Image (cartoon, rainbow, N blue to C red):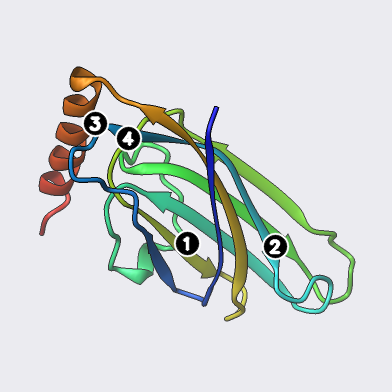
Amino acid sequence: MAIRSFRGKLADLGSETIALHTNDGSTGYRIIKLEIMSIQPGVLDEAHVVQIFTIPHTDTSFYDNIDFSDPTLLASAFLQQDDQNYNPGFESISFDNKTFNQDVYVTHADVKGSAAINYHIELEIVKLDLTENTVATLKDIRNIIRNEP
């Protein structure tokens, strides 16, 4: 099983594109790990929401809303801590075992403040046959059309 990993830091209300598309769409991916960590553990009062989508989400007012009925949501993570260490860090992560072959978009919101967050994502690389390639691409097109204003 081949793995690709990505890491970075997202500002509050920030988003980042992870480029995964290929010319022929024959390479697919599945999320196997999403980890987040405070930039200053135990120092800041913070509550972070990080989500991974199959389409870009430009309305930052929704970055802190987790909606498991959203077909474009691939994964979400939540981390909470306070500066008095009364509440130790808490992390809850949810994954959807979807295979995708296009770019993904990572969003972040700190619902208590404006701190940035570190993230680490591991993806399993999957070789897609023509049928799987077509299905994955058509799902992406459908989701883009469904979410246009």
- Return the residue nearer the eye: 132 or 67: 132
Point out residue 47 in the picture as x, y percentages from the top left corner: 65, 66
10 versus 80 height, above or below: below
Residue beneath label 3, please?
A: 136
Q: Amino acid at mark 2?
A: Met
Q: Quadrant of the C terminus?
A: bottom left
Do residues under tags 1 and 3 come within 8 Å of each other at their CB atoms? Answer: no
122 versus 137 height, above or below: below
Tell me which numbered mark, 1 or 2, is placed earlier along the sequence: 2
Residue beneath label 4, please?
A: 27
Point out residue 49 in the picture as x, y percentages from the top left corner: 55, 59
Do residues under tags 4 and 2 come within 8 Å of each other at their CB atoms? Answer: no
The residue depicted at 33 percent of the width and 36 percent of the height is 100
Q: Secondary structure at mark 2?
A: strand
**Which quadrant of the view contains residue 81?**
bottom right
Q: Secondary structure at mark 3?
A: helix
Q: Secondary structure at mark 1?
A: loop
Residue beneath label 1, please?
A: 64
Tell which tag, 2 or 3, sits nearer the viewer: 3
Tell me which numbered mark, 4 or 2, is placed earlier along the sequence: 4
